[in-house]
Each structure stands twice: as C-alpha cells, then as structure tokens.
Image (cartoon, coloured by chain):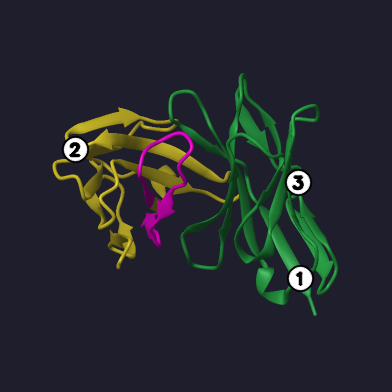
Chain colours: A yellow, B green
C-alpha cells in the first residue's frame, strides 16, 4: 500500500518557468490538499479538493493552480515560478474533512533561482 | 484570527524524563485539534486528535495530549522520552471551512 506519493522529489526551476507537481493516493480518499512548508512557519494550505472535479483556495493560493481530474490524483501547477515559491511542498489526503486525520506524502523540494 | 500557537521553537529533554510540547488555540466554537510529527526528510505523520469526549487523548508511540478548554490548550505529553522521539512536532486545528491551520512547529531533542 503506497499511501500518498509525490512526483518529483526535487526540482530546480528558473524564474518564469512552469512546472506541475503530481500527487497520487491509493486510499480512495475524497479530500486532497496541497501545502507548502517554510522554516518557522509550519505548513500553509495552498489549495484543496473535496472530490473529483472540485477545487478550492486555501490560505496562500496566489501563483498556483490545481486540478483534480481523477479521484486519486491532485496536480499543483506553477505557471510562472518566482523565488518566493522556493519551498517544500506536501500533498495530503483524508477520508473526509473535519474530524479526520490527513495522510501526507514525502514532499517535493522546489528551488526557484 | 483563528489559529494555533506553539510558544516554544525548541524543547530539550533527557532520555527517560517526561516531555511536554505546548500548543494553544484560538478558535471559535468547539475545536478539532491534532498533533503531527515530522522526522527528517519525511512527510508529517498523525499522532493523535481531540474531537470530543475525554479531555485526555492517547495516541501513537506512547504520546498523549490533554485538552483544556479553560486555558485553550492542547499540550502533547509523554511520560518517558526516547532518543527516537527527537523530531519536529506540529499542532493543528481544523477551521469551519475545512481549512487545517498548523502551528509553526516545535523541535524536540531528546539527549541520551
């Protein structure tokens, strides 16, 4: 049982380049999330999805787009990368929201130069 | 703003001693509170949660947390620390719109 997987693990981008981060979960969870982790700031929610075909903005959505075309996949896109987007990105999933714990992927370390 | 706060960036304890990692919350209504642990170069792992019921919640790896409504706290505790408990610990709260807000994290170091 793979749980939550993320692709790629590391990436270096130049300012203005675009990329897509892929998150996949095999637990049949309805909810999926994208977070960024920065030193001293904990995790901040970028976007989330409450089911296939639906997405919603989190705390820090600017500069990112997401899509959930299949229940098991949640894609995070950066259309024009900026140095401020240098961070570690985590995907998570949960059965439902509210009282249910989230299961996290191993993370993607992104550096924008 | 609704959130959680972890007042200590770093907690150091000796192996075998009890440990406490502090968390306070500021949320209207009844909070759903969580503790997660992060080991180096890994994603977060769920430890325990408080939804309702008993104020003392038991979780994974011998950890427990006490929900205190009057002090708006949810401190993480363990009676006897292990070196392998050394990690980054995050407190989190679910807001009404399903947004989970995390504290800034507390780095726990357990020394032999």
Question: Which residues fall within the magenta stretch?
Answer: A91-113
The residue beneath circle 1 is B110
Front position in the image: A2 or A40: A2
- Residue A52, which numbered label? 2
Report helix, strand or loop for mark 2: loop
N-terminal of the pair, mark 1 or mark 3, is 3
Quarter of the figure that contains the C terminus of chain B? bottom right
Compared to residue A22, the image places residue A31 above or below, namely above
Check whether the beta carbons of the residues at disc 2 and disc 3 lie within 8 A of each other: no
Q: Residue at x 58, y 58 (%)?
A: B37
Q: CA distance from mark 1 to mark 3?
A: 16 Å
Q: Is residue A98 magenta?
A: yes
Q: Position of residue A112 (x, y in %)?
A: 36, 53
Q: On what subunit does the disc labeled 2 rest?
A: A
Q: CA distance from mark 2 to mark 3?
A: 37 Å
Same chain letter for marks 1 and 3: yes
Quarter of the figure that contains the N terminus of chain B? top right
Front position in the image: B90 or A38: B90
Q: On what subunit does the disc labeled 1 rest?
A: B
Front position in the image: A58 or A54: A54
Report helix, strand or loop for mark 1: strand
Same chain letter for marks 2 and 3: no
Q: Residue at x 33, y 36 (%)?
A: A48
Total labels drawn: 3
Q: Residues within 10 Å of mark 2 (few under 14, many from 20)?
A: some
The residue beneath circle 3 is B22
């Amino acid at each position: 049982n793979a749980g939550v997987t993320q692709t790629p693990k590391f990436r270096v981008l130049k300012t203005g380049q675009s990329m897509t981060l892929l998150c996949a979960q095999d637990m049949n969870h309805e909810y999926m999330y994208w977070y960024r982790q920065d030193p001293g700031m904990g995790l901040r929610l970028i976007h989330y999805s409450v089911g296939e075909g639906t997405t919603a903005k989190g705390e820090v959505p600017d500069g990112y787009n997401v899509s959930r075309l299949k229940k098991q996949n949640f894609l995070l896109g950066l259309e024009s990368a900026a140095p401020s987007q240098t961070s570690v990105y985590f995907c998570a999933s949960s059965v439902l929201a509210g009282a249910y714990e989230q299961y996290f992927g191993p993370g993607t370390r992104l550096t924008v130069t | 703003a609704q959130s959680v706060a972890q007042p200590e960036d770093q907690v150091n304890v000796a192996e075998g001693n009890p440990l406490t990692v502090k968390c306070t919350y500021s949320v209207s209504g009844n909070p759903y509170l969580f503790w997660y642990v992060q080991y180096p170069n890994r994603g977060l792992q769920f430890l325990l949660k408080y939804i309702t019921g008993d104020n003392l919640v038991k979780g994974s790896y011998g950890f427990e947390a006490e929900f205190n409504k009057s002090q708006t706290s949810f401190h993480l505790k363990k009676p006897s620390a292990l070196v392998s408990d050394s990690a980054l610990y995050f407190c989190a709260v679910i807001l009404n719109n399903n947004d989970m807000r995390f504290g800034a994290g507390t780095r726990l170091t357990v020394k032999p």
